């Protein structure tokens, strides 16, 4: 069950979810872009998260919204074979989200999960935004069709190059 203490809680009774609206609206944006993407054999790269495949306390809705992107990439790969579509897990990136997490949400998280993020920050192990950003930009420009439908881990993709 999702906790009300979570910043991204879910109420099962009416499916109210305070999460990222970007993920919830991705299908609308993709639908609008598909005619031109079909013509150009374009690419769609969704920014997903490890939270899509790993449970983190208080992140139920966030993780679910990212899993939606992974599934949308799989579905589009089948339904739109001329458009290369994938989801990328960028890793833990030193962004405003991480600042907000540390400032307001660690107290709501399980100690183990909060300590993991705290450790990544204090040890300087978070990625700079330009690191996965560069890879994502290259994928938008040059991703081969055989990556379509895949859920890529940023580090694995970098090592493949």
Image (cartoon, rainbow, N blue to C red):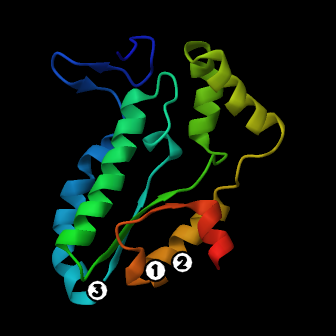
Residue at horizontal 24 percent and vertical 66 percent from the top: 76
Q: Residues within 10 Å of mark 1 (few under 14, many from 20)?
A: some
SS under mark 2: helix
Question: Between disc 3 and disc 1, whose residue precedes?
Answer: 3
**Pointer 2 with pointer 1, Cβ within 8 A:** yes
Circle 1 is placed at which residue position? Answer: 143
User: Separation of disc 3 and disc 2 at Cα?
Assistant: 16 Å
The answer for how far apart the CA atoms under marks 2 and 1 are is 7 Å
Q: Is residue 127 above or below residue 101?
A: below
Dot 2 corresponds to which residue?
138
Q: Nearer the viewer, residue 43 or 52?
A: 52
Give the CA distance from mark 3 to mark 1: 11 Å
Q: Position of residue 115 (x, y in %)?
A: 71, 24
Q: Examine the rendered structure and indicate whether residue 56 appears above or below residue 79.
A: above
Identify the residue shown where x is 15% and y is 20%: 14
Residue at 40% x, 28% y is: 60
Q: Identify the image quadrant of residue 66.
A: top left
């Amino acid at each position: 069950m999702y906790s009300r203490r979570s910043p991204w809680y879910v109420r099962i009774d009416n499916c109210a979810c305070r999460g990222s609206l970007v993920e919830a609206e991705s299908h609308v944006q993709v639908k609008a872009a598909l005619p031109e993407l079909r013509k150009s054999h374009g690419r769609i790269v969704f920014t997903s998260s490890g939270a899509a495949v790993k449970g983190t306390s208080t992140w139920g809705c966030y993780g679910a919204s990212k899993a939606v992107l992974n599934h949308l990439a799989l579905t589009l790969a089948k339904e739109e074979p001329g458009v290369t579509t994938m989801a990328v897990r960028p890793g833990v990136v030193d962004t405003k989200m991480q600042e907000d997490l540390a400032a307001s949400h660690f107290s709501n998280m399980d100690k183990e999960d909060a300590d993991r993020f705290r450790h990544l920050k204090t040890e300087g192990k978070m990625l700079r935004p330009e690191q996965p950003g560069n890879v994502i930009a290259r994928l938008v420009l040059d991703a081969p069709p055989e990556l379509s439908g895949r859920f890529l881990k940023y580090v694995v993709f970098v090592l493949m190059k």
